[in-house]
Image (cartoon, rainbow, N blue to C red):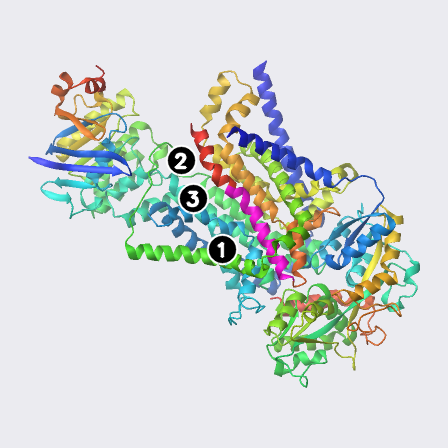
Amino acid sequence: MTFLRIRNVEKSFGRKKAISELSLEVEQNEIIGVLGPSGCGKTTLLRIIAGLEVPDRGEIIINGSTVYSKRTFITPEKRNVGMVFQDFALWPHMTVREHIGFVLESRKIKKDEKISEILRLLYLGSLAGSYPEQLSGGEKQRVAIARVLAQEPRILLLDEPASNLDQILKREFKDELLRLREVLKVTVVYVTHNYLELLGLADKITVMKDGRIIQEGKTDEVYENPGNGFVASLFNK
Amino acid sequence: MSLRFHADLRLLLKILTLFLFIVVAIVPLLCILSSDFSLELIPTFLDERLLFIFLRTILLGVSTVAMSLLIGVPLAFLLEYTVLPFRSFLEKVYILPLLIPPYISAIAWLEFLGKKGDITNLNLPLDIYNLPSAIVILSLSFFPIVTLLTSFALKNIDSRLEDAARLLYPQKEVIRRITLPLIMPHIIISSVFVFVFSISELGVPALLMVNVFTPEIFAQFSAFFDTSKAVTLSLPLIILIFIIILLNRSFLGGKSFITISSFSKRKKSIELSRTQSLVALSFASLILVLSVGIPISVLLIESRLQFSIALSEAYTPLLNTIKMASMGATLMVAIGFFLAYFYRSRFDPIILFPIAIPSMMAGIGLIKFFNIEFLSFIYNSFLIVIVGYATRFLPFVTKTLHPFFEQIHPSIEESALLSGASFWRILHRILFPLMKPGIISAWIVGFILSVHELSTTILVSPAGLQTLPIRIYSLMHYGAPEMVSSLSLILIAVIIAPVILFLLIKKSLFRAVTA
Amino acid sequence: MVYVKRLLILLLLFSLLMPACIDSGGKSDEVVVYVAHDQDYSEPILRAFEEETGIRVKTLYDTEATKTTGLVNKLIAEKNRPQADVFWNNEVSRTIVLKNNGILETYCSPNAADVPAIYKDPECYWTGFGARARIILYNLDLVSREDAPDSLMDLTDPKWEGKTCIANPLFGSTASHVASLFAYWGDDEAIQYFTGLKENNIMIVESNGMVRDLVVSGECYIGLTDTDDANDALVENKPVAMVFPDQDGMGTLVFPNSVMLIKNGPNPENGKKLVDYLLSRDVERELAYTKAMQIPLKPGVERPENVPDVDELKNIPVTPEELYNKLNVSQVFVQELFIR
């Protein structure tokens, strides 16, 4: 079932056209990878899905309801979309516990047990009172995941989350994501310029260039058969 | 061999800087504190009248901070967060109130609200000889400090932190729970500055006959010739300011949640509805009119545009002022650069110490320290005036440089060191170029502060040397409003000129630095 | 961009060298004088001295802002190594402060001989010239000639309640005036008078100039100020009039400029010459004809119509020493009373 439908979306910043007539469909529970070089518009695409950026035209439909069209705009906090950023963007003035509490509060959940449960799940118990600057890269990663668990979004967007991680953490992150998809039944859009992150993770891959989709399909298929030299270069071929 | 030379030069500069700082800023002040301080006078503080005055002083400081925040923070948000019409104009213009010396604003307001009846026969029955008026005038002068620092913080917030919260909460909540806490350290520092400035200000309370501590200390010097009592009276003020500086340090640990990183510095743009835009613009315009429009217009009208006469009259003081302020700024940047480089924020209490000392005291201290045969080449020349500027303003110049240094990652220097560069080379090829915007900003700060300095200069000036503020003030006596107003406007123009220059070449500067 | 940078560096270097050219600081024949008198009136006189004698005059002016005391404080602070030769003060009480601090040197100028005894120091520490007086200025549109005040006591009259003004009584000539009343009336009566002023809601403003401005604009009907401040308004034909108060009673406070030699100054001989010059009849005449309308003390000096004859003007019979002795106690009192 199509969970996320993006139809003919366009977005310009001043004279620069970031996204041109882009259409995309993502099935429920699918992990779709968006692959492209920097400046191709993939981050803008994510922000449009999240509602942080308003397109110039087009439609976005999540689980059957229109969140964006000429007549409609559902604000970000109402879309139940989660996002994980490069370097995780943890809030420097909050402790780990406060991070989780902050997210739960937005869902009007005030249960301390829930916080403890999430802390336990991610082995963050002893770090509950720590601030982001006191955490290692791996610990920050777990806090980012904790945020997602607390939010239980229906769509999870990832913006180059693994770019600054070492191999071990990259591996762990991939495993966490797969586990999250299982537990939360969440639909995932994973944006990156590094194809390696998508292998073994994404069901489908969409290749973007200059604001357009130039190839899409199952991960293995795209990988084996890049449509042109440009796509091939993205796979280091 | 080169490594040892490097270490030696570095050490030499470090010691030299400390030495100069101590000689210029600390010793004269300690001089007067030690020679004229008298323990026996302490009981005088229990006088009911003095306690009232002290409380009133604190009230003045706190209220000015509150009002400056009320004006400055929303303005910063409007400029950085919204698509406000005329935004680019407003962004440049909101600094103006800071460039107009507060006592000149007070003079203009007094003329406007019917004291002389010359300018407006509005006969407004508005009595502005009171504390609230002083608070308003001071807030209108100092709010740009709040706006500047808040804007800087807002510009450099990692917007993804807000995005992450925006997915959970509506915009207002995000501002309340994420944005504001993140910029709080900057807001607090700006509050500290506003507080210190407002309670150290002498001109405005004196003109408006508001009895706070600074006029009281001044009276001891000038009416009672009791330097000891003046120094002793200064203590509560000095201690208060010192405590605030220390609290500031321990609270924030000198930390800031804003790092200049390469991450999203997207221009935030919240669209405003038509009514919202109108309200916002009205607010911004009102502030501008009150803080800049009225004082400048009043001065223009009162001056009767007699600029050429004023210029020919005050040509020498004007030139003296420009030259000495320039030299003073250069000296302060020279010392301040190394001071900021070698001694970072944890040394703030020492670096900021001179701020707490009232200007007249600094003057007397300078005379006592420098008026000896050995130092006569300084004392009997214009150099003493420049030293006076440094004594009073080195802290500000140094603090301006700190954040710029903090932006330069230590690895930049370390990699140069490892490649064999001497310290001189590192300075020359790496630090100076990277610090260019910082150096220029600091120079401008030093220049502006020196140009309108009055009370210390009066005391230390050698005979035959007059500065423009002194000339303006002595002219006030006669009721020569045309001259006073013309020269005040010229003074303001002198202050504004380097700022405008800076804004014009700013783009090419920053481009060169980030390349 | 490179050009701009080079230009800026050049400008900076240039600015570094220029001031050096102005203050040559050479050991030419010179005299250093600190002046607490208005620059506009004193400067021409000092330039004339320079031309006549060829001695270079280096001056330091004080401003209304520091109420003349910037220079006095500087003189005291410089005691161990005086930088000035002469101090031209515009009143006498601070001169006594300097005398008592041992800053002054005696010098009996030949030109001091014909100055009346009450206007000079018996031991020649200082000599007076060109005086001002503490007067009442009132607004002609608001105060009729019959109601016109002629005594200080008028300011306590309830019919002028809230309509009187005076400069900050801690500073300047106002402080001298207050001290003279304490000296003449005695503490108790003076305290009564000033309390009366407060109960009559007298307005305190920053300076004598402001008092004048407020009387001109009508915000004050009556104000206490100095003759030179008042005259600034009179020559502009503002609707105000000046009264020398209590001429039928205790008299008006008349206070002269005072000139003195600084002990161990750098150029003592030139200093004496300057003192002589300032005490000449020509200078008193010139000062009388300025807008400051300073009253000549020497007999028979030519003066314009609006400047009174010092012999005809009744002065409060208080010596400068008596006034000085009351300075502290009077200032403490008015500070308690008015500056809260």
State the separation of the CA atoms marked 1 and 3: 28 Å
State the separation of the CA atoms marked 2 and 1: 33 Å
- Mark 1 — residue? B292
Point out residue A77 in the picture as x, y percentages from the top left corner. 22, 45
Helix, strand or loop at mark 2:
loop
Read off the chain for label 2: B
| In magenta segment, residue B482 | yes
Residue type of the residue flagged with mark 3: Pro
| In magenta segment, residue A98 | no
| Proximity of marks 2 and 1: CB atoms separated by less than 8 Å | no
Instruction: Give me the disc on residue A47.
Output: none
Point out residue A133 in the picture as x, y percentages from the top left corner. 37, 33
Q: Nearer the viewer, residue C189 or B45?
A: C189
Read off the chain for label 1: B
> Magenta-highlighted stretch: main secondary structure?
helix
Q: Are marks 2 and 1 on the same chain?
A: yes
**Horizontal side, residue B488 vs residue C45: left or right:** left
Determine which quarter of the picture holds residue C206: bottom right
Read off the chain for label 3: B
Q: Which residues are drawn in magenta?
A: B480-500
Determine which quarter of the picture holds residue A130: top left
- Mark 2 — residue? B259
Question: In the rendered structure, which disc, 3 or 2, sits on the residue that comes first in sequence?
Answer: 3
**Horizontal side, residue C258 vs residue C68: left or right:** right
